[in-house]
Amino acid sequence: VTLDPGFPFTPWQRVEIHKLRQGENLILGFSIGGGIDQDPAQNPFSEDKTDKVNGWDMTMVTHDQARKRLTKRNEEVVRLLVTRHSLQKAVQQSMLSQPCH
């Protein structure tokens, strides 16, 4: 892959989660944290960000709005688009260490 240092690069990852059945309920199997009303430093992966859930823009939602979107009863599969800033940093470091031609 050739990257242009002047072109913004944001690596993202598509994640598909199949909810677990617990009696009559479908559950995610993990806790939901974050939201624009939360402190991002409290998240275990505070530099990663969920941009979309099943096609819905999640960039400017509160914690409660995110929870409601992720736990919809009629959705057995949750598809996430996650920005991985840890990958972005690795790519930037790699670009800085490449010799100029």
Image (spheres, rainbow, N blue to C red):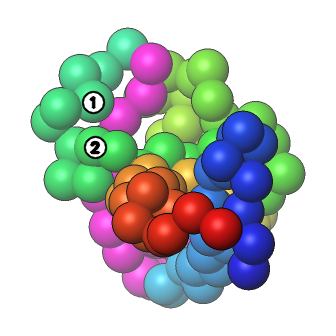
Q: Taking 58 as reference, is 54 above or below it?
A: below
Task: Residue 23: say if magenta.
Answer: yes
Q: Taking 64 as reference, is 2 above or below it?
A: below
The three-letter amino acid code for the residue at tag 2 is Ser
Q: Is residue 25 left or right of residue 2?
A: left
Q: Is residue 94 left or right of residue 81?
A: left
Question: Measured from the top left, where is residue 45 in percent x and y?
Answer: 27, 54
Question: Measured from the top left, where is residue 78 in percent x and y?
Answer: 67, 68
Residue, x 65% and y 35% (percent of image)? 58
Q: Quadrant of the N terminus?
A: bottom right
Residue, x 43% and y 57% (percent of image)? 96
- Residue bearing mark 2: 46
The three-letter amino acid code for the residue at tag 1 is Pro
Q: Is residue 57 visible?
A: yes
Residue placed most toward the observer, 87 or 94: 94
Picture quadrant of residue 86? bottom left
As drawn, which residue projects farthest toward the right? 55
Looking at the rendering, the stretch of residues picked out in magenta corresponds to 22-36
Q: Is residue 55 left or right of residue 99?
A: right
Name which of mark 2 and mark 1 comes first in the sequence: 1
Question: Measured from the top left, where is residue 16 in percent x and y?
Answer: 65, 79
Give SS at disc 1: helix
Q: Taking 46 as reference, is 99 above or below it?
A: below
- Residue bearing mark 1: 40
Q: Which mark is residue 55?
A: none
Residue, x 61% and y 20% (percent of image)? 60
Badges 2 and 1: C-beta atoms under 8 Å apart?
A: yes
Disc 1: CA contacts within 10 A as few (<14), some (14-19) or many (>=20) = some
Q: Is residue 84 visible?
A: no
